[in-house]
Amino acid sequence: MATNYPLAQTTASAALAPQLTAGEEVVKFIRTKPLGAAGALIILLMLFLATFANVLAPYDPYQGDYGVQFARPSAEHWFGTDEFGRDLLSRIMYGARIALFVGFTASFSGCTLGGLLGVISAYWGGRIDLLLERLMDILLAFPQLILALAIASILGPAVQNVVIAISIPIIPRAARVVRATALSVRENVYVEAIQALGASKPRIVLQHIIPNVMAPYLIMLTAQLGGAILAEAALSFLGLGTAEPTPSWGLMLSGSASLYAEKAPWIALFPGVAISLGVFGFNLFGDSLRDALDPKLRKG
Amino acid sequence: MRTYIAKRLLLIIPTLLGAAVLVFLIMRVIPGDVALLIFGGDQAGQIDPQQLAAMRHRLGLDQPLIVQFWSWLWGVLRFDFGTSLWTGRPVVEELLIRLPLSLELTLAATVISVLIAIPFGMLAAVRQDSWVDYVIRVVSIGGLAIPSFWVGILCILFLVIFFGWGPPLEFTPPWVSPWANFQQMVWPIVTVGYRYAAVTTRMTRSTVLEVLREDYIRTAWAKGLAQRAIVIRHALKNSMLPVITLIGTEFAFLIGGLVVTETVFTLNGVGRFVVDAVAHRDYPVVQALVFLIAFCFVIVNLLVDLTYAWFDPRIRYR
């Protein structure tokens, strides 16, 4: 009996371990991952600005006023105005909508499709795996921006086309990562057991493999978010993303920004700060989430 | 080792063939007719349909897709990428004009970034959690978040406001005038290299930190070796594998950086050539460039894999 004692005690103390409420979990995250919390704060601020842009923005982002072209930052126009007299602060607020929409949808669709292909590749194996892997190899041979550039040029400048152009290069990257995890999950005894019980392949994949590859999927999703926002900015900057007069951050930096650099440096300054801050927030949050979800990456 | 290299070289063939098919198909489904664009676009249907058909025939666009693909692929094998539909000159000729600039930019950005990043990464690791570490980390995290075209715009802004300098229109090769070339290229190199240096610094820092906790480092300390010898001779070489891998994966970003940087600084390089060709629907040029970039990417990654053995003699290729 004496040998059972420590075990019983461990079980008892485990049962007594306090269950953290959602609020307490948040406090714990802030305390243990202050940088991640700062990232989350930036993301929340962006979300807030994007959602309430129509209420918060002091001016119409599309409406130019030729009387106030190139106005310096002032009490009326905090970030100044551009060459058409449009208020930069309002355009940046509305720009957060485009950045978040493209960032979320592109990384979500790219990672989900890639993740599914990765799971299929790992679970079915054989010829399907070989074929999908070669296809992913081919897609990976193209630098992300070049592939997005080629795709964006086929589809033409529109927000939904930018999403497609950015999400396709994400697919092979997500497929690789998720496939690697799914391969090891497939070898687990519980998968073997459920197979022996006669479960169908789709059921095994949906109920047992997919829930166990969620951690790398989520890590990939947050890691790609910042990159997707950067890619949208780059495509718009090159004239292949969203078209004028849409207030996209990248578009705001193309053409006029360097053209009027001397006359109105604020045109080039604020949209760049917005992009950098947004991507910075997502990177910080993504790094912390990766540390929290993947015990192998926890550093001493 | 030889068998491994041969195997890897053979594996390149299906990848590149797939890439060729993909590039070809992507370019062929692009809406917009090159023949029409050459006539300056069809405003109100003024272009003679017969002339248009003749132009399509001259460009070979009236052939079935498979015929077009085979003739293109046959050309690629003989290093003949066809003629630019926009300028009417051979693609290889157009490429060779622009290659020195882009090559200089890529190589200089890579070499300078690595030369800056490795010592700073090491310094951050050795002085972990000191103010030196924090400054290096903040600057390098910034490199991941700040878009390279904005770095370029800020460089121009700074130079224009303080020195009244604008980017020159003509490229001066280093062998013509090293000083003029330096003046022209230093800011684009900074623009392309910032992200690269940032990523390399972060990677060096984290791998050196990991290696410094290894048992053999403790042994080196116990033997009474100096810190410099431990860090440089023992820790650095063993933490180089992930850093070398980065050179391969970051090559893709470098090309992306090249595209936007050359656009910002109005440099007539390969990156800007891609953007212009995409805008003009210049199939042969885009096809050739995207294919060549994919080719370089595959080769760079193969070379990276092969350098592993040099850094870590325990690695054996099979």
Image (cartoon, coloured by chain):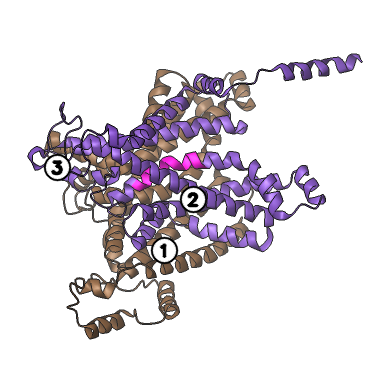
Chain colours: A purple, B brown
Q: Amino acid at mark 2?
A: Gly
- Give the CA separation, mark 3 to mark 1: 36 Å
- Give the CA separation, mark 2 to mark 1: 23 Å
| Looking at the image, residue A278 lies above or below residue B304 | above
Q: Position of residue B168 (x, y in %)?
A: 16, 49
| Looking at the image, residue A77 lies above or below residue B174 | above
In the rendered image, the quadrant that contains the N terminus of chain B is bottom right
In the image, taking residue A91 as reference, residue B118 lies left or right, namely: right
Res A110 label: 2
Identify the secondary structure beneath mark 3: loop
Asked if marks 3 and 2 touch (Cβ < 8 Å), the reply is no
Q: Residues within 10 Å of mark 2 (few under 14, many from 20)?
A: many
Q: Position of residue B145 (x, y in %)?
A: 37, 36
Q: Chain of mark 3?
A: A
Q: Nearer the viewer, residue A279 or B141?
A: A279
Q: Judge whether residue A225 is colored magenta.
A: yes
* Residue beneath the point at 41% across and 63% down: B291
Q: Nearer the viewer, residue B219 or B243?
A: B243
| Looking at the image, residue A70 lies above or below residue B219 | below
In the rendered image, the quadrant that contains the C terminus of chain B is bottom right
Q: Residues within 10 Å of mark 1 (few under 14, many from 20)?
A: many
- Give the CA separation, mark 3 to mark 2: 37 Å
**What segment is highlighted magenta in the picture?**
A221-232
Answer whether residue A212 is visible to the viewer in this image: yes
Q: Chain of mark 1?
A: B
Identify the secondary structure beneath mark 2: helix
Q: Chain of mark 2?
A: A
Q: Earlier in the sequence, mark 3 or mark 2?
A: 2
Q: Nearer the viewer, residue A208 or A134?
A: A208
In the image, taking residue A125 as reference, residue B261 lies left or right, namely: left
* Residue beneath the point at 46% across and 28% down: B122
